[in-house]
Image (spheres, rainbow, N blue to C red):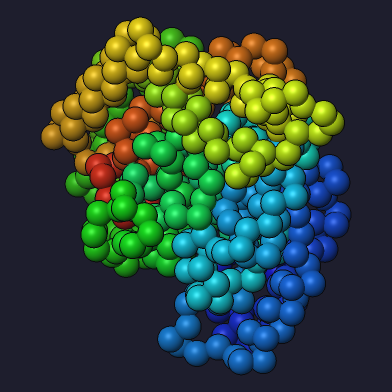
Amino acid sequence: MANLNELTIRAVAAGLRAGDFSSEEVAQDCFKRIRERNDDVNAFVHLTEESALERAREIDKKGFSAKDSLLKGVPVGLKDIFSTKGVRTTCCSPGLKDYVPPYDASVVERLRDAGMVMIGKTNMDEFACGASTEHSCFGVTKNPVDLDKVAGGSSGGSAAAVADDMCIYSLGTDTGGSIRQPASLCGTYGLKVTYGRVSRSGVTAMASSWDTIGPFGKSVDDLAIVLGEIAGKDRRDMTMPDEKVPDYTASLGKGVKGLKIGLPKEYFGEGIEKETKDVVMASVKRLEKEGAEIVKVSLPMTKYAIAVYYISMPAEVSANMERYDGIRFGKKASGDVKDLVDQYFVTRGEGFGDEMKRRIMIGTYVLSAGYMDAYYKKAMKVRTKIIEDFAAAFKKVDVLIGPVSPYPAFGIGEKLDDPLAMYMADALTIPASAAGLPSLACPAGSSKDGLPIGLQIIAPQFQEGLCLRVGEMV
């Protein structure tokens, strides 16, 4: 029998209900794996072993019934951006290193109600700004497949923890690709949901019109189970429509016969490594054999997506970071300061890393007088054109498929001194984010060096079930 930490959610749930093992034993196996591997991988930055084992024992004592959530007693890792009552939530920033929230994020509340066992908080790029988890005050998260490579970002810790069997599932956030890209690079499953599908209340804001919350899992079924628990209207997040939450697991097992799958030519063009294209196309061919119809489509505005993102997102980052002034939130300035302005300079100089400072400066610039019309407002108009691109494509096809990343995991430090090269890592994930669409990252195969290569399945808004249905067949 496999080690308990290697099981899927459904397998753990079945074993707990059959009495084959206890929730405490599953958690212990996860902590054992963390002790063996976390010093190398650096997926977890805070562990809650004592409270997790205590919670698992409580759950075991109460027992399990048919009415219980399948997540009851199942160990989870949470990205260090989710507010967790009484447990440090630092966003992996020097400015929040000692912050302990007095409340839980809405999604954390829902998972607690479902009976989760939280085993710790996972590493991330500072305030979710990054594509490699190299911008963390706790150090870089390494790819569990190859410790010389990055795990992706910004949810690199959450992806690596699941891929390396340190937890059964995890939560991350996806603003421009921060769930899909690390899932692809680490060889696991990750779901970016429709904007407004899952509550953002209690999740530290990066770029408020782009941020989404989603799960990592060891199977498509895992993602369907978690999404069913965390999706749905929350009065504390006014950006959420009152959209019904379906049974996502009911989308599975239907196959792809009769579905039209679109291949955007822009996702297979210049800049995408041949090996990545070949692996993704091999999966597409398998779907065609299963009865899907493959249709070539075009998303001509794709080439502008990165420019739109790196104007709009830093503008929102700049506005959201304003509160970390050392007075309301964040690290207070050390040493003597001359006046209030000097305090701001010192506080933010010490409290933010280089990538954060870069994005705040870009965002402040594009929002400044004389530049807002030239940059920010123009970017918003182009974002609308990207949305229209997808709307036109979905009149012809049911879903779209393409690579997640132009290439497999790159070396640690390889792109650190070249921000533009780093930003290009999100070239294929940003368009779906711009349009607020759901997108599922699935393992598709490996490079000749054994590095995972993933593909993404993009569906119309609130059609996560369609992503999962196709993803199950990849």
Depicted 246 relative to depicted 406: above or below: below
User: Which residue is at 19% across, 27% downward?
Assistant: 388
User: Which residue is at 58% across, 56% downward?
Assistant: 83
Please state which of residues 83 and 419 is positioned toward the viewer in this rendering: 83
The x, y position of residue 143, in whole percent, is: 71, 37
User: Which residue is at 24% across, 19% downward?
Assistant: 381
Please state if 115 lies on the left or on the right of 384 as rendered. Answer: right
Please state if 215 lies on the left or on the right of 51 as rendered. Answer: left
Quadrant containing the N terminus is: bottom right
Whether residue 383 can be seen here: yes
Q: Quadrant of residue 360?
A: top right
Quadrant containing the C terminus is: top left
The x, y position of residue 287, in whole percent, is: 34, 41
Q: Quadrant of residue 361?
A: top right
The x, y position of residue 239, in whole percent, is: 31, 49
Q: Quadrant of residue 17?
A: bottom right
Please state if 113 lies on the left or on the right of 334 as rendered. Answer: left
Please state if 318 lies on the left or on the right of 459 as rendered. Answer: right
Whether residue 445 can be seen here: no
Please state which of residues 214 and 6 is positioned toward the viewer in this rendering: 214
